[in-house]
Image (cartoon, rainbow, N blue to C red):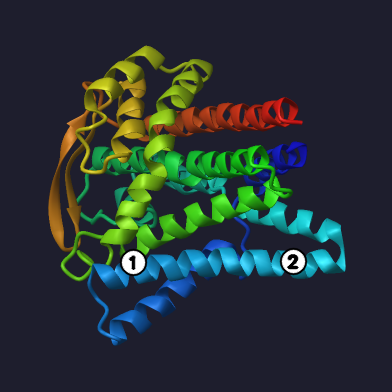
């Protein structure tokens, strides 16, 4: 368990300084390629309903876990330290804090120099909505919403599931809590990638993508609610309005169409003193999202940077809490 805690902390540090690894054998890229292949196969077989979606989820998770455990067993036979290197690489690859804010910074920069067209293009790289008709405030609002929502999906949930599965493995007496933690992380990333690729409400994916979307809702359910505590501490450390964030989140967190996204978004809206949400334009439809927050201040590039600072500090809080939890459980059940 001490090794599990060390790997989690080192993975966070690697992501913080290096960002997402550009290697072709990135686990999430491989999972995405597998999903595309499985989807084509299932649709060719005519399995385009919820049943096919369940098979897709099962095949994707099974392949991710099976490949990891098989490869880990193989390289462990070559040298036991190689399994530690593999586990550290996978844990590092499953975190996305640096890239989350790295993609938001160009949006803030282009808005600051009044280059709206380029800001729209930069935002289009990280969201699925149509950005071509957004004004500067709309672009900034989209960036803040993306950072706030993806704090849970890209940072908090992987940390959470690594820690939960490692602790459960240790409590149950399993000999490899690190491997269990990586299995938890990979399972979450497989579900998250499935949701991003097929979990849409469009006519094509309404049934086929529903199992992936529901699994993603379940996987983020506890982390999204835990994010309110983590973000509250992060807001105090970053000089934002922690109490306002808590108050707005308690009022608005369930207004969002997603059962989870509204938690972190509404907290950030309150902490920054702005309004998020509102009508959102997608290529195939317009979604009239409810407004989150009461702030009358227009969202601008400074709010993007403040949101990133808040998320960075909240992420430090999260990793320290989870590492401490792993160490405490190691001592308690040793």
Mark 1: few/some/many CA within 10 Å (<14, 14-19, 20+): some
The residue that appears at 55% across and 27% down in the rendered structure is 313
Q: Residue at x 72, y 31 (%)?
A: 330
Q: Work out which residue is located at the far top of the displayed protein and give it.
A: 243
* Figure check: 91 above or below 205: above
Residue 159: x percent and y percent? 56, 40
- Find numbered disc 1 in the image and state the secondary structure of the residue it sits on: helix
Image-quadrant location for residue 166: top right
Q: Nearer the viewer, residue 184 or 40?
A: 184
Q: Is residue 140 left or right of residue 325?
A: left
Residue 26 lies, in percent from the top left, at 60, 64
Which numbered disc covers residue 221? none
Please rate how many residues cluster around mark 2, counting C-alpha atoms within 10 Å: few if below 14, some from 14 to 19, many from 20: few
Upstream in the sequence, badge 1 or badge 2?
1
**Depth check, front residue: 211 or 316:** 211
Q: Residue reaching furthest bottom?
A: 44
The residue drawn where x is 36% and y is 28% is 268
Image position of 268 with respect to 214: above or below: above
Which residue is the site of mark 2? 73
Secondary element at tag 2:
helix
Q: Can residue 118 be seen here?
A: no
Residue 66 in the image, given as x and y percentages of width and height: 59, 68
Tell me which residue sits at (70%, 69%) in the image. 71
Say the numbered circle drawn on residue 54.
1
> What is the spatial separation of the Cα atoms under label 1 and label 2, in whole angstroms?
28 Å
Residue 104 in view: yes
Q: Quadrant of residue 21?
A: bottom right
Name the image quarter holding residue 57. bottom left
């Amino acid at each position: 368990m001490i090794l599990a805690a060390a790997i989690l902390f080192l993975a966070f540090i690697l992501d913080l300084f290096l960002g997402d690894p550009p290697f072709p054998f990135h686990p999430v890229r491989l999972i995405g390629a597998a999903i595309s292949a499985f989807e084509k196969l299932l649709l060719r077989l005519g399995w385009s309903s919820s049943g096919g979606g369940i098979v897709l989820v099962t095949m994707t998770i099974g392949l991710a876990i099976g490949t990891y455990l098989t490869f880990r067993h193989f390289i462990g036979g070559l040298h036991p330290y190689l399994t530690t290197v593999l586990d550290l690489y996978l844990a590092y690859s499953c975190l996305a804090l640096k890239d989350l804010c790295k993609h938001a910074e160009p949006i803030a920069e282009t808005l600051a120099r009044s280059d709206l067209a380029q800001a729209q293009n930069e935002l289009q790289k990280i969201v699925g909505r149509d950005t071509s008709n957004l004004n500067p405030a709309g672009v900034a609002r989209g960036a803040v919403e993306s950072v706030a929502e993806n704090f849970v999906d890209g940072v908090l949930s992987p940390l959470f599931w690594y820690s939960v599965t490692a602790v459960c493995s240790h409590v149950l007496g399993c000999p490899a809590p690190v491997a269990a933690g990586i299995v938890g992380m990979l399972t979450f990333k497989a579900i998250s990638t499935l949701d991003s690729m097929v979990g849409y409400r469009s006519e094509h994916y309404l049934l086929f993508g529903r199992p992936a979307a529901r699994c993603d809702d379940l996987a983020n359910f506890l982390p999204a609610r835990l994010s309110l505590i983590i973000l509250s501490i992060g807001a105090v450390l970053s000089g934002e309005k922690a109490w306002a964030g808590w108050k707005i989140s308690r009022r608005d967190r369930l207004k969002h169409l997603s059962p989870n996204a509204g938690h972190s978004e509404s907290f950030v809206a309150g902490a920054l003193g702005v309004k998020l949400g509102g009508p959102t334009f997608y290529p195939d439809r317009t979604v009239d999202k409810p407004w989150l927050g009461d702030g009358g201040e227009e969202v601008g590039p400074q709010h993007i940077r403040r949101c990133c600072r808040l998320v960075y500090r909240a992420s430090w809080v999260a990793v320290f809490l989870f590492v401490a939890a792993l160490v405490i459980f190691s001592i308690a059940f040793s």
